[in-house]
Image (tube, helix red, strand yellow):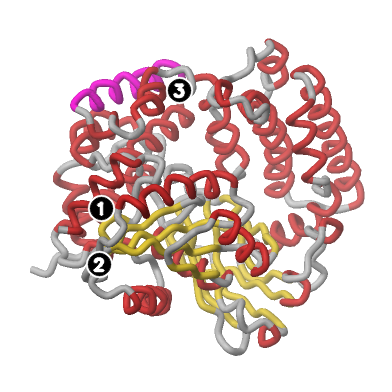
Amino acid sequence: MKLTLKSLLFLITILNFGCSNENESMIIENVVVTGKIFDQDKFPDNYTIKIFENNLISFGTYHTALINDDGSFKIEFEKAFSSDVYLMYGGLITLFVGPGDSVHVEFDANELLNLNRENQYKFQSLKFSGDNAQINTEIKDFFPHVFYENPIEATNKEKTLQPEDYLNYLEIVKTNRIQILDSLQKINEYSEKFIKWSELLINYRFATRLFHYTWFYPRSSNNEKRKFEVIDIPESYYKAIENIPLTNAEAIINSNYPSFLHEYFLTNTDYNSTFDKKLRESGGKFEQSSTFQEEFERYLTRIADEYDGIASEILISQRLFGLMDSYNRIDVFEKLYPEYRNNLRESFCYILDKKYSEIKLAEKSPHKNKSLLKDNNEIQVVADDILKRINDKNKGKVVLLDFWATWCGPCLMEFEHSKKLVKVYDQKDIEFVYLCVKSKKENWEDKIREYNLSGSHYLLDDSEYDILSQKFQIIGIPHYVLIDKNGEIINAKAPNPSREEQLTSLISKYLN
């Protein structure tokens, strides 16, 4: 019998894991987003469009599609619950979609690709039809009234204001947005769905920014000793969110809820856990140690003790997903997942089972990188073509891909470590390939000169990066991919050069 992803997922579900949370009956159906981009032919370098979906468990998933010559496109993906997602083409278009929805979007390329602060939410050409057309139109018309805020000024306030002053600032912003919503309701017949969604947005956006401040403020001091500090959180912060529930199953329709849950968890649980401390102190060694499972179990037990309801389910599911995705400890996942599966809703288990089945299928495939391909065969073809050009120039060599940007501080910090590795592997069959993204040509050239980087250099256009980020599931940069001498993907999430011992150990296996 030919083993496919779906058949393996089914077998894994019925034989090993399978969730049974009675609070949720799983309904997972495809969402189809079609569209028409007018004047697309004026921008030939922008030949992809994508949707970013916060699926609660994997910290977000990109779904990418190629744009046809006539400006039409189609993106199809699975969804288990209704919520907002982001259609990304120059600017961000917020879409509200649910399982089984068919949504059609039309807009002018000139408008979306020529944005500035004043018009970043004012999309005159944007039109919706199909399912949820009403709420999507209401969201489009609502944003320009409440979300124009100078991002530089907002960040400066977060860096400089004292805790109580920052709370007062956010409360003023929140109050103004509530007043605007109230005034708009008096002159517009908004749907109940939109009113609920917009109230959740205002409240959870406020709470997210408040707890983001608790770790961002000390880190912005540029004091290395304060890098993982959290301020002494005032009681007023908890009082400010006493009417904004930490556990709120109805709030998953708005992406600001999981964002708040993440920020609250970081500062109240994660940063002061022994698990996180050992991760930071070990430089990656702890992840593969014999004591990792024991410490991880304590970590999950603490989450179960401190959180309840859907908040607990989301946080535990995220950590279990991380065992497979971040720590490469499928062995620990297999031991711990059965203990928690009956307390997780079916849709969360579906995501975990699907990830697990992809990994197990890859183990049985001679081409392990195939498990990384998502959704669209055309995307695979274009991605493989880009990689083929790189591999053809480096035949017989191990290749380390470095995705970076000129404005990315962590990327630039890694360069000193990369340069050390270049010296270590001088005259060896390895090529360091730097793929710069989302950057201007002149800035790219300046940084190469400034850091005196050897190796191969490519400046990707936005569409090329979209395609490769889809293939490698890149969420943020810097991001590293290791390829063997035969052009096969060894590790799509390779260690950073600053984790020298772990990366050199991996590289050395494939140089011999």
Which of the marked residues, 1 or 3, is nearer the chain's N terminus?
3
Residue tagged 3? 308
Sequence order check: which comes first, mark 3 or mark 2?
3
Please tell me which residue is depicted at 52% across the width and 27% down the height of the picture: 266
In this orientation, does residue 371 appear? Answer: no
Residue 297 part of the magenta-drawn span: yes
Query: Residue 269, position in %: x, y?
Result: 48, 20
Q: Amino acid at mark 1?
A: Ile
The reply to whether discs 2 and 1 touch (Cβ–Cβ < 8 Å) is: no
Q: Which residues are the magenta region? A: 290-306
Q: Which mark is residue 507?
A: 1
Residue type highlighted by circle 2: Glu
Quarter of the image containing the C terminus?
A: bottom left
Label 2: element kind: loop
Camera-nearest residue between 300 and 427: 427
Few, some or many C-alpha atoms within 10 Å of disc 3 (few <14, some 14-19, many ≥20)?
some
